[in-house]
Image (cartoon, rainbow, N blue to C red):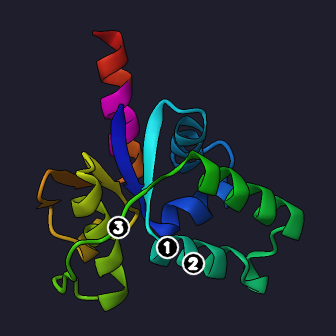
């Protein structure tokens, strides 16, 4: 199974645009077609960001989404601190990807990350969706 780390902006996009590529990837992760990888720090960021009042998400939808993500995730323990991203808050995603040996880190902000890290490619949601679609055709 393909291991992925989803940046918070992918989770937010999935909740705001339920028919977009981010939502499709989240559904794939929740149904077990992809393995979403998490750390406590990433989950806490998901919770904090999607609970912001300006996003206007129903608290029940937020709670159900977080519950589903928590239960579907492969929880990993970070083995080392990484400090390579221009935004220090983004380093937690690389740390998780490295610890999980994830194949992909999915983000809407690829410019904030190196193009690859350890075993992981950094891609936008649409790119991973296209890769998955092409793989399913083979």
From mark 1 to mark 3, how far is it between C-alphas? 9 Å
> To which residue does mark 1 refer?
40
Tell me the quarter of the picture where residue 136 sits: top left
Q: Is residue 125 left or right of residue 117?
A: right
Q: Specify the segment rendered in magenta.
A: 127-132
Query: In the depicted view, which residue is nearer to us: 84 or 39?
Result: 39
Tell me the quarter of the picture where residue 100 sits: bottom left
* Residue at the spot 73% in from the left edge and 78% down from the top edge: 51
> To which residue does mark 3 refer?
77
Residue 58, percent from left and from top: 87, 67
Determine the main secondary structure of the stretch shown in magenta.
Answer: helix
* Residue at the spot 61% in from the left edge and 57% down from the top edge: 70
Tell me the quarter of the picture where residue 79 sits: bottom left
Furthest residue toward top: 138
The correct choice, above or below, for 63 with respect to 72 in the image is below
Q: Which mark is residue 44?
A: 2
Query: In the depicted view, which residue is nearer to us: 117 or 74?
Result: 74
Nearer mark to the viewer, of 2 and 3: 3
Answer yes or no: do the residues labelled 1 and 2 have beta carbons within 8 Å? Answer: yes
Q: Residues within 10 Å of mark 1 (few under 14, many from 20)?
A: some
Q: Secondary structure at mark 2?
A: helix
Q: Secondary structure at mark 3?
A: loop
């Amino acid at each position: 199974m393909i291991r992925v780390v989803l940046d918070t902006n992918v989770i937010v996009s999935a909740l705001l645009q339920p028919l977009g590529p981010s939502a499709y990837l989240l559904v794939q992760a929740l149904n077990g077609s992809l393995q979403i990888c998490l750390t406590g720090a990433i989950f806490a960021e998901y919770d904090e960001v999607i609970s912001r009042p300006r996003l206007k998400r129903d608290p029940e939808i937020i709670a159900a989404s977080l519950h589903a993500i928590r239960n579907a995730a492969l929880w990993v323990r970070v083995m080392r601190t990484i400090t390579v991203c221009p935004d220090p808050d983004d380093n937690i995603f690389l740390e998780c990807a490295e610890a999980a040996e994830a194949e992909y880190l999915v983000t809407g902000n690829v410019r904030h990350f190196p193009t690859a890290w350890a075993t992981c490619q950094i891609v936008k949601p649409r790119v991973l969706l296209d890769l998955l679609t092409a793989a399913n055709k083979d």
